[in-house]
Amino acid sequence: MTPANIAGLAKLAGAELIAVTDHNAADNLPAVQCCCNAYGLRLLPGVEVNTAEEIHVLCYFKTVDTALEFGRLLYAALPEFPYDPAVWGRQLVMDENDEVLRTVDKLLTGAVSMDIYVVGRAPHGGCGVQPACAGGGFCAAQAAVTWDLTPVPMEWNRDLLVFEMLLPYLKRGREAVK
């Protein structure tokens, strides 16, 4: 999907806040932020990291700039893999008008050389990390993770105030559940 499509469809669906997490990259977040601003949406910028152990974790940031900084660290940690767009598809960086700015040369879905503990300790601008997919009844939308990367059961989430930015939305969700 393109930045404008993501924001436009989120607005049509009635969203007020969206989180966008590309694999090992944050380069499209500036365009998504522009599109979210145009549609009156809030953006929680993020990156889905594929760690050295092949564990996918979602990293969230307070700002797009912090996500971009982290994305540069991840890009440097990606292997020099012979990437073939004919096999893997094109990896595009786009602007807010969905125009292609450039293509990415490294395969973004590969594992970075950083293990899960390095990713967990990396500077995230004060925001958090959670598993993109974890076994045993946890899922990305419902599982929170403490900084020692211990999953918190989903039934505890209602009492967690994980992100300052999400607090108003969490409160509305709680009221709807009652």
Image (tube, grey):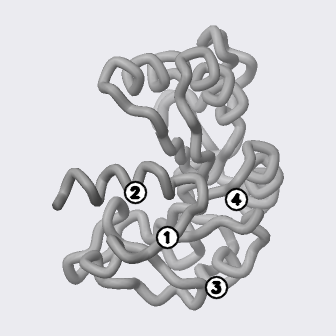
Secondary structure under tag 3 reads helix
Of the two numbered discs 1 and 3 on the same chain, state the one appearing first in sequence: 3
Element at badge 4?
A: loop
Of badges 1 and 3, nearer the viewer stands: 1
Question: In front here: 110 or 94?
Answer: 94
- Compared to residue 82, the image places residue 110 above or below, namely below
Q: CA distance from mark 3 to mark 2?
A: 28 Å
Q: Which mark is residue 170?
A: 2
Q: Which residue is mark 1?
A: 161
- For disc 2, the neighbor class at 10 Å (few under 14, some 14 to 19, many from 20) is some
Q: Tag 4 or tag 1, which sits nearer the N-term?
A: 4
* Quarter of the rendering occupied by the C terminus: bottom left
Residues tagged 2 and 1 counted as in contact (Cβ below 8 A): yes
Q: Picture quarter containing residue 85?
A: top right
Picture coordinates of residue 31, whole percent (x, y): 67, 24
User: Disc 4 marks which residue?
Assistant: 78
Amino acid type at mark 2: Leu
What is the quadrant of residue 70 in the picture?
bottom right
